[in-house]
Image (spheres, rainbow, N blue to C red):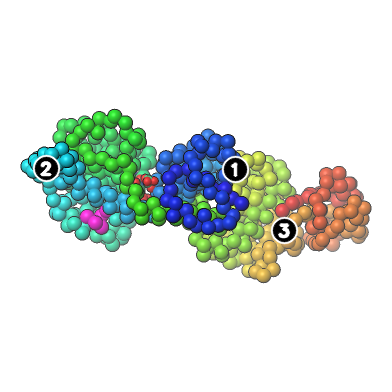
Amino acid sequence: MFRVLVSDSISEEGLAPLQKSEHIEIVQKHVTEVEDRLHEFDALLVRSATKVTEELLSKMPNLKIVGRAGVGVDNIDVDAATKHGVVVINAPNGNTISTAEHTFAMMASLVRHIPQAHISVKSREWNRSVFVGTELHGKHLGVIGFGRIGSEVAKRARAFGMKVHVYDPFLTKERAEKLGVSVCTLDEVLAVSDIITVHTPLTKETKGLLGEKNLAKTKKGVYLINCARGGIIDEQALVKFLKNGHVAGAALDVFEQEPPGDHPLLSLDNVIVTPHLGASTVEAQLNVATQVAEEVLQFLEGKPVTSSINLPTLSKDIYEKIQSFYNLAKKMGMIASQYMNVPVQEVTVTYAGTVADLETTYITRSLLAGFLKPRVASTVNEVNAAMIAKERGITFGEKFSNETHGYANCISFTVHGEQNTFTIKGTHIPNYGDRIVHLNGFAIDFAPEGYLLYIEHQDRPGMIGKVGNVLGEHQVNIATMQVGRQQAGGKAIMMLSLDKPLDDALLETLSKIEDIETVKKLEV
Ligand SMILES: NC(=O)C1=CN([C@@H]2O[C@H](COP(=O)(O)OP(=O)(O)OC[C@H]3O[C@@H](n4cnc5c(N)ncnc54)[C@H](O)[C@@H]3O)[C@@H](O)[C@H]2O)C=CC1
Ligand SMILES: O=C(O)CCC(=O)C(=O)O
């Protein structure tokens, strides 16, 4: 049974995929109302009100996933979530249309003074001459940030007969041409536009993007719209430019602080505002809630998620193809880690054969997670494995090779310690399973499962019998046994799978047998 905490107000109907599952219990309470139960939850669903901080994450040791029913994740400390091994997902496109339409509603309201005229008529006035507006048709619209929402706004603007100028450093010329917009520099957009609308995320680069310096580069009489994030237009600078008449008006759905309190912007007649309503439509809320609910369910059921902020995106299709290698890699990582229980500086994974054509980033993360698991106390999984490896000074790299050792696919994992190096090679055989086919230079063939006993010894007659006797005397049953050697009479290895775990005293006894050099228990 998984417990899902829904901390903000999220469309009830959208939660249906979770509600229908027998394995999910949903608790709809704000995090502050369940302080004493936070440790119980496996998933957390939020909009923008709940702040997912490091402190909150530390109180939720069972948490596996945070779902943001919306786009912006600025209320979530994504780095802290990654550190805690918690996946963060969002609903990237469920509210695009609503926010684009809201932006357009704000644009029309702004240039036709609709909110001001509305208040006037409601105050029993009939003052037609003060509310003379301007047409949108033929005007130059500057769109800063041409992602999902920016491009939908541009489509609508073109339908209104506007000329659209776009600034987005990550936009390709082909995409811009396809959408019939001209790609400009920021300065060009600032200089040419009658109306400027911002649709970027709030980042170090975009914070204060429209501040004093850039506002001074705009046309006198420009209108500004922000339905993205408070702070992209610097509020202090905006007040100054509205007061001196350079900016004719502004439409704001978002603020640096929400709610903005008694902000000077609110007392200016040429500013129209809404309380962060871009995504507040029945349709958008249903879309985003359904999207995150479905993704959270998928994730809790062990399936891949497609809209993760801190994991590479993986489609169901690709996941099905890599799943076997993903499991094999984790087991190889665990074996290597237990064998090399010494400080490690570098690990390398090499892919050969069919596996080399797949999305190996995920397989590598799985391998790293398996490798780090026995050595770190905190949760380690695909989300934080790379980060933890880096923190511990372990460099890792991927290589590709043609050496499959006769198998259709082969994964090699090499671990470099201060004194020695260990290499393990594995393959996945469809309808047969995972096999380890090379261990530290020895050809071998065993399934990486259960309680394993690994022995390095000199190749002498009677070694198998000696080991079998000791185990038998201690009531340890051998399920399977594989041996390998480089040459007769040289160094040899044994890999036994046992029905129960070995205790340290028994390992000690085994290690004292003459000609045995190394004894390791490996649990997978
Ligand atoms: N008011 C509301 O209720 C809502 C607000 N939003 C906000 O709207 C904004 C846009 O959302 P989407 O279009 O879905 O995001 P998106 O990720 O599809 O698009 C953002 C675009 O901004 C561009 N960009 C990034 N840095 C830039 C920079 N320095 N200068 C210019 N462009 C830059 C990116 O290349 C990308 O094309 C986000 O801040 C999001 O949080 C989203 C939904 C609802
Ligand atoms: O949850 C909301 O209504 C806010 C939507 C929003 O700002 C976003 O999706 O980025």
Query: Is residue 317 shown left or right of residue 402?
Result: left
Q: How many marks?
A: 3
Mark 1 or 3, closer to the camera:
1
Amino acid marked by disc 2? Phe
List the residue tagged with mark 2.
131
Q: Of helix, strand and loop, which mostly describes the magenta segment?
A: helix
Number of the label disc, if any, that sits on residue 190 = none
* Residue 345 visible in rendering: yes
Give the residue pinned by disc 3: 448
Q: Categorize mark 2 by other alpha carbons within 10 Å: few (<14), some (14-19), many (20+).
A: some
- Distance from Cα at disc 1 to Cα at disc 3: 33 Å
User: Quick check: 308 above or below 57?
Assistant: below
Q: Are marks 2 and 1 in contact (CB under 8 Å)?
A: no
Q: Nearer the viewer, mark 2 or mark 3?
A: 2
Q: Residues in magenta?
A: 153-157
Amino acid beneath label 3: Pro
Outermost residue toward the left? 129
2 or 1: tag closer to the N-terminus: 1
Callouts 1 and 3 close, C-beta under 8 Å: no
The residue located at (69%, 48%) in the rendering is: 337
Residue position for label 1: 40
The amino acid sitting under disc 1 is Glu
